[in-house]
Image (spheres, grey):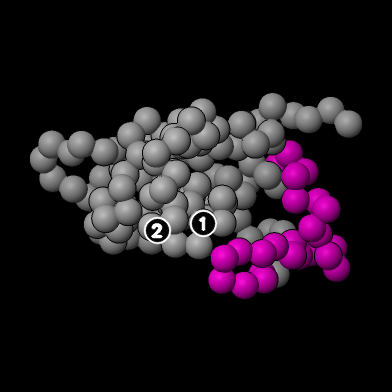
């Protein structure tokens, strides 16, 4: 089976980082760690199933995967990540979600999760979801 570049893990993570770069940074002045890096670090923490921010922070000591796989340039420590992410409005991330969902939908990446012809059965960190296929 041929994997499409844009639906590979690398392609999707690159697209996510590009989308995160479009999210307006709520902080004022000179910032050391960019919002896109912080958002991607938050995503990496969840996708790697780190049990806590502190456990994820341990991975900063050997950052090769975070740099190479997730494209994170500057990795925030646990305190920095909490401080930065606390100021992000959830609604500002909606375009990122919609773009990723559309890309998966367009590339037929969600077809294995289609049920009853009009829903996708997906899981997230806070439950199992039925999403109508024509939602976005």
Residue range in magenta is: 106-129
Please tell me which residue is depicted at 79% across the width and 64% down the height of the picture: 118
Report, in whole angstroms, how far the alpha carbon at label 1 lies from the one at label 2: 7 Å
Can residue 7 be seen here? The reply is: yes
Q: Which mark is residue 50?
A: 1
Residue of label 2? 53
Quadrant housing residue 79:
bottom left
Image vertical order of residue 73 relative to residue 92, above or below: above
- Residue 124 is inside the magenta segment: yes
- Residue 95 is inside the magenta segment: no
Please tell me which residue is depicted at 45% across the width and 35% down the height of the picture: 62
Please tell me which residue is depicted at 81% across the width and 59% down the height of the picture: 114
- Indicate the secondary structure of the residue bearing disc 2: helix
Left or right: residue 73 compared with residue 135: left
Within-10-Å neighbours for mark 2: few <14, some 14–19, many 20+ = some
Q: Give how far across and how far down residue 12 sits, in percent.
A: 60, 37
Q: Give how far across and how far down residue 25 sits, in percent.
A: 26, 45
- Image marks 1 and 2: residues in contact by CB distance under 8 Å: yes
């Amino acid at each position: 089976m041929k994997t499409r570049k844009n639906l590979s893990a690398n392609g999707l993570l690159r697209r996510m980082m590009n989308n995160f770069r479009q999210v307006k940074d709520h902080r004022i002045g000179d910032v050391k760690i960019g919002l896109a890096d912080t958002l991607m670090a938050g995503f990496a923490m969840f996708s790697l199933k780190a049990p806590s921010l502190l456990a994820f922070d341990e991975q900063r000591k050997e950052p090769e995967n975070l740099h190479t796989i997730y494209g994170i340039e500057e990795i925030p420590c646990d305190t920095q990540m909490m401080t930065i992410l606390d100021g992000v409005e959830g609604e500002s991330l909606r375009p990122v979600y919609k773009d990723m969902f559309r890309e998966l939908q367009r590339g037929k990446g969600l077809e294995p999760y289609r049920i009853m012809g009009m829903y996708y059965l997906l899981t997230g960190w806070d439950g199992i979801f039925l999403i109508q296929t024509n939602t976005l």
